[in-house]
Structure formats: C-alpha cells, structure tokens
Amino acid sequence: MYVTSLTLNNCAQATQLHRACFYKGWTEKDFQDFLRDPLVFGLKIQKEDTFCGYILWREIDHEAEILTLVIAPPFQRKGLGNHLLKALLTYLKEKKISKLFLEVAEDNKAAQSFYLRNGFTLLGTRPKYYKRPENKFVDALNFVRVIE
C-alpha cells in the first residue's frame, strides 16, 4: 500500500469512485477543475496497481479544508482512510497549517465516527445542505481539527 499525489490522470478513477460512494457524485470535469486550482491538492492510496481511494483538500493561508475523502467499498474499514488522513496531517504540519476543516452529511454516521476518532470536534451545522432522493435535504455537520 502506498500514497502518492492525485493527478489529472486519476480523474476518471476518482469520478467513478465518488459516484459509487455518494448520492450526487462529482463529474470528471469537477475533479479536473479542482486539480487545476492552485489551492487544491490530493493524495491517492493504492494497493499494488489497485486505486483504493483518495483525499482532496484546499489550502488557504494557515487553514485547510477536506473537500472529499473516499475509500473504495472493498477497502473500507481496513485502515486506508486512517493512512490517508495521517499522510495529509503530516503534510499540513510541515506546511505550518494549523487547522483542518471539513463537512459531513448528518446521515453519514460512519464518516462522523471516523473523524471524531481522528481528533476532529464538531463546530456546528449547516441546515439542509446535502440533497437526497425525492428532493429531501440533510444538514451538513462542520468539524475542525487543530494541527499541532
């Protein structure tokens, strides 16, 4: 298992994985636009030649925000998300970034548990942020982790 940069060459794989894991998955163009943005960065995790997941984040001044973290279903709950997050935290610490933010859908209990276990604290909610089937919406939960 190894972690390397997520690049424009990975956009098709990232799109396929994002759409498999989220109700409104991003398009390949979305990933291309993110990765062309000078403030957005990504890491991918692979096992041999298998694309297992990635994390995408934005950096502004001394803060960063996770835009998405996805692990392919067959590789979930095997430590790969922890491995990616640890790599990101190490990178951000070296860049003297002091806070890492993210949002999680209120109905994504697994992600909430993951981030709480990894030192994030709940800041608040953004009402009716994520769209769901049948034109329903769920709140976004805002989390932060101080990087020391």
Image: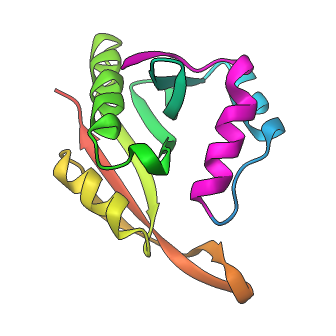
Q: Position of residue 130 (x, y in %)?
A: 60, 70
Q: Position of residue 28 (x, y in %)?
A: 80, 38
Residue at 40 percent across and 31 percent down: it is: 63
6 drawn magenta:
yes
Drawn side of residue 146 relative to residue 40, left or right: left
Is the residue 119 above or below the residue 41 in the image?
below
Residue at 65 percent across and 78 percent down: it is: 132
The colour mode here is rainbow
Is the residue 130 above or below the residue 75 in the image?
below
Q: Position of residue 114 (x, y in %)?
A: 27, 53
Is any part of residue 121 visible from this angle?
Answer: no
Is any part of residue 97 visible from this angle?
Answer: yes
Q: Position of residue 124 (x, y in %)?
A: 35, 67
Residue at 63 percent across and 48 percent down: it is: 18
43 drawn magenta:
no
Drawn side of residue 117 relative to residue 69, left or right: left
Could you say which quadrant of the image residue 89 lies in?
A: top left
Drawn side of residue 134 relative to residue 94, left or right: right
* Quadrant of the frame with the N terminus: top left
Looking at the picture, tell me which residue is in the foreground, 111 or 130: 111
Could you say which quadrant of the image residue 78 lies in?
A: top left
* Quadrant of the frame with the C terminus: top left
Looking at the picture, tell me which residue is in the foreground, 30 or 1: 1
Q: Which residues are magenta?
A: 1-22
Question: Could you tell me how many numbered marks the image carries?
Answer: 0
Magenta segment, prevailing SS (helix, strand or loop): helix
Is the residue 109 above or below the residue 123 in the image?
below
